Image (tube, coloured by chain):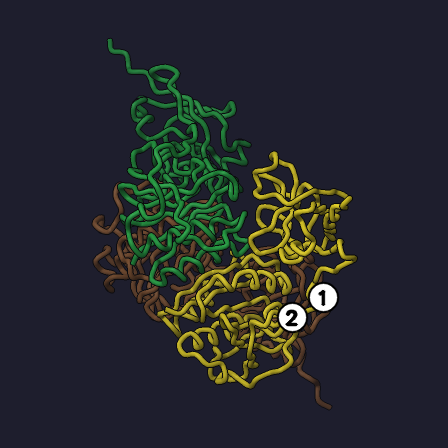
Chain colours: A brown, B green, C yellow
Amino acid sequence: MRIITLLTDFGHADPFVGIMKGVILGINPRVQIVDLCHGVSPQDVLEAAFLLKCSYRYFPKGTIHLVVVDPGVGGMRKGLVAEGRHGYYVAPDNGVLSYLFASGEIRRVVEITAEAYLLHPVSQTFHGRDVFAPVAGHLSRRSGIDRFGQATRRPVRLRLPVSTKKSARVLVGSILHVDRFGNLITNISGREISALHPERGITVSIKGRTMHGLEQSYDRLKPGETGTILGSAGYLEIFANQRSAARLLKAGRGVAVRVEGGRRHKRG
Amino acid sequence: MRIITLLTDFGHADPFVGIMKGVILGINPRVQIVDLCHGVSPQDVLEAAFLLKCSYRYFPKGTIHLVVVDPGVGGMRKGLVAEGRHGYYVAPDNGVLSYLFASGEIRRVVEITAEAYLLHPVSQTFHGRDVFAPVAGHLSRRSGIDRFGQATRRPVRLRLPVSTKKSARVLVGSILHVDRFGNLITNISGREISALHPERGITVSIKGRTMHGLEQSYDRLKPGETGTILGSAGYLEIFANQRSAARLLKAGRGVAVRVEGGRRHKRG
Amino acid sequence: MRIITLLTDFGHADPFVGIMKGVILGINPRVQIVDLCHGVSPQDVLEAAFLLKCSYRYFPKGTIHLVVVDPGVGGMRKGLVAEGRHGYYVAPDNGVLSYLFASGEIRRVVEITAEAYLLHPVSQTFHGRDVFAPVAGHLSRRSGIDRFGQATRRPVRLRLPVSTKKSARVLVGSILHVDRFGNLITNISGREISALHPERGITVSIKGRTMHGLEQSYDRLKPGETGTILGSAGYLEIFANQRSAARLLKAGRGVAVRVEGGRRHKRG
């Protein structure tokens, strides 16, 4: 059974997501629909891009990821269907697939132009229902993205907030996402941390507070104490045991984080 | 595979919805359950009625819509099973199907009296679990609503907040729903707008603010600017590009909206 | 088709739940996944334990309940798979199954040690994805819990907040849960209430307010009036018709509730 996941900023106060599922099931009653997340901040394309990147690998190969975070709905922005090494992606052409372009996951992209696959009349405000859900539904019945439109070579790519190396021992990054527990997820990867030789000691600073060393689990610290850990998405996280680090540090997305690696022990 | 949708005011902080799904799957393990929306304002029957009306057409024919917004649970209000042109409906008899009665969607209604289909002992506070979910589960296994009770001719109907025509060129309506993005959905339909000849110019006023013309997409306006558009449910919407119109205009459900059509160009 | 339910404190702002579903479906594409509830207060093991106890009976026999409320993730706490009379349970060993141990539902428990069933590398912060979801997925394909590890005899049990009998006619309990509507669910069971002979008159006191008698439905009272009722989970509830009792009484979890049974009519 084919899987379609849904990633949107539609929240849970409206029937938008339910309606999209109705449209999909009308096209393919045998598909398995999974809610990836509907709590993306309204119209926050970069956040959705990051969450998609952290998630797609955990689904079976061939899963179709339908992303609707779409501030440009009804305007000039295009719609995309992409084929990746691991999955398929149906989304507005607004940069929400940027991480997947950057990582090489996506191999081919077409622009959605085939009117026959859309729900008519196409509204001006809900392409999730009228464009993206029907395209995902049809794709789940039969593979092959070329019937939806022409290949496109220049999809929109966001400038991704990457960390920068200040010196051999110093990295500066920023907070990319705050999760439900108030953990602060940075854009500094485990690989970058490893290159700083954390076994020699590492120091992380945010908003004037400095933390030493990486913890092995949240509960190594006292309740309310802040620390750092390698998070499940593969990035450095700042947390407070049993509390919200976001609230304690009054920190949110975009706040700068500085990481300093340890010095090599001098010999002799 | 038969589909049952769930529309409730149960929110997401409790296992109410999950429990209803358990009951349904115990009766029919092969049914596909879809969450339509659980974010209806607590006990707001009219809001649920409106959201159901905007949604049911997007599901395959024969879909069963289970609605539990039920301030009168455990009291004298009855339970209904209805057969429509497009779908089936299982709900308390409190007016939540009013739009579907008004539009002619519903053709026959029975009052739920057959004890054999209920989960005993029936609680005083959770008929979603003990009455409506089991009835929907049984209905999904075999069509035909008559085994659940006697036909009823006088189901409760709410007075729906319709727009009123003040003159040939002026309509007054109100806000029916505020969506996740803060868009204000009115009860003035696209058909009513068309009759005002919007191509000659149209003016929409709410809380002392006046907007001219209908936009073709949100992003035709500058971020934060307010405008009007024909929304995806077929009604006039007031929006603010990339912002919440509800917050900017301090407007919510029930607030009056005035629409004035354009004058015919005088000749000569 | 086997059912797996998910009960977590992950909320809806992150893709944690969606990712767990991806992992499960990668192992068993034919399983039916049901969201029991993701709105458990962050890291509130006791609340999750209570909600699970109120829910599991409504699912078909053999349902697998996956619980991830896990403040000790990555530390020394163990993971459990339990076989019950009614269902199966996969959860951290932190007391979240306490009610099911106390009631005799659970018959056998093993500690998860079989590395072959986990998703490697196992992260320090998301065992829902790397430990519990894969174990539940494998269990849904084939019954038998012994392949996951050794039987354990001393799983963690919480001290459950039980009501206490002050005299033959007086019980003191507390609020265990506040639901979406602001209803206050106590830990005083219907059986305990029955033993107080409520037909002779019963008095419930909370925060200095006293209510007389049990209502048969919410709408027996005027809107905003507070009363008591036997709730759907089998416990005494304090409610306010069409309002939030929690807000009106400024009461939440842990607040004391006193119940006094009626006096026997004197004869002669």
Q: Is residue C108 above or below residue A48?
A: below
Which chain is disc 2 placed on? A
Residue sitting at 76 percent across and 54 percent down? C170
Would you say A81 lies left or right of B223 here? left
Taking the view exactly as shown, the residue that stands out farthest to the top is B268
Asked if one can make out residue A195 in the rendered structure from this viewpoint, the answer is no
- Using the image as rendered, state which of residue A38 and residue B121 is in the foreground: B121
Could you tell me residue C144's position as x and y percent? 46, 81
The quadrant where residue A193 appears: bottom right
Q: Dividing the image into 4 quarters, which one contains the N terminus of chain A?
A: bottom left
Q: Residues within 10 Å of mark 1 (few under 14, many from 20)?
A: few
Q: Dividing the image into 4 quarters, which one contains the C terminus of chain A?
A: bottom right
| Residue type of the residue flagged with mark 2 | Tyr
Q: Helix or strand or loop: what does disc 2 sit on?
A: helix
Taking the view exactly as shown, the residue that stands out farthest to the front is C268
- Using the image as rendered, state which of residue A182 and residue B8 is in the foreground: B8
Could you tell me residue C186's position as x and y percent? 66, 54
Residue sitting at 51 percent across and 69 percent down? C66
Q: Which mark is residue A218?
A: 2
Would you say C178 lies left or right of C123 here? right
Q: How many marks?
A: 2
Would you say C99 lies left or right of B113 here? right
The quadrant where residue A138 appears: bottom left
- Using the image as rendered, state which of residue B182 and residue B23 is in the foreground: B23
The quadrant where residue A88 appears: bottom left
Q: Residues within 10 Å of mark 2 (few under 14, many from 20)?
A: many
Label whose residue precedes the other's in the sequence (1 or 2): 2
Could you tell me residue B121's position as x and y percent? 50, 54
The residue at which mark 1 appears reads as: A223
| Residue type of the residue flagged with mark 1 | Pro
Cα distance, mark 1 to mark 2? 9 Å
Asked if one can make out residue C35 in the rendered structure from this viewpoint, the answer is yes
